[in-house]
Amino acid sequence: MEEEFRVGTMALAWDGDEQRMIVEAQALVELDAESDEDLAEAEERLLQDEENGPPMLRVRLTGLQARAFAKRALDVVNAGRPPCPLCSLPLDPEGHVCPRQNGYRRGA
């Protein structure tokens, strides 16, 4: 499985008119800003620019679908990633920099 983008911001909302839960996942974006004001302004522009902004996944779920989604998400989180047999840190699919191997990168 290949990711389309890494999520930086997630939001949950409820649409009472349609009785739907809305899940939004927006791509992680690195901004170059010289001050907190510049950063806040850049973030606001990105959030409002649906056409040219960062990739976003928006899903609308019924109550039944939302419960199934939550159960599946809990199952995935509880499954976790396998631990490294040497240091017990989680293994990434790309490999693992193990502190017990002085940073030697082990394959998963």
Image (cartoon, helix red, strand yellow):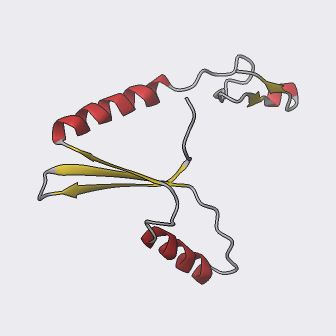
| Rendered residue at 66%/30% (across/down) | 92
Q: Is residue 19 above or below residue 36?
A: above
- Residue 8, horizontal then vertical, whole percent: 53, 54
Point out residue 44 in the picture as x, y percentages from the top left corner.
48, 75
Name the side, left or right, on which 24 lies relative to 99.
Answer: left
Q: Determine whether, in the image, residue 24 is placed left or right of residue 63.
A: right
Q: Residue at image x 30%, y 35%?
A: 69
Furthest residue in direction top, as rendered: 85
Quadrant of the rendered structure where residue 14 is?
bottom left
Residue 13 x/y as whole percent: 27, 56
Q: Is residue 105 above or below residue 41?
A: above
* Total number of numbered discs in the rendering: 0
* Front one among 71 and 83: 71
Residue at the farthest front position: 51
Q: Image check: 85 left or right of 2?
A: right
Q: Residue at x 13, y 51 (%)?
A: 19
- On screen, residue 43 above or below 81: below
Split into 4 quadrants, where in the image is the C terminus?
top right
Q: Position of residue 90 (x, y in %)?
A: 63, 28
Front residue of this view, candidates 68 and 84: 68
The image quarter in which residue 74 lies: top left
> Is residue 93 shown above or below 44?
above
Of 77 and 5, nearer the camera is: 5
The quadrant the N terminus occupies is: top right
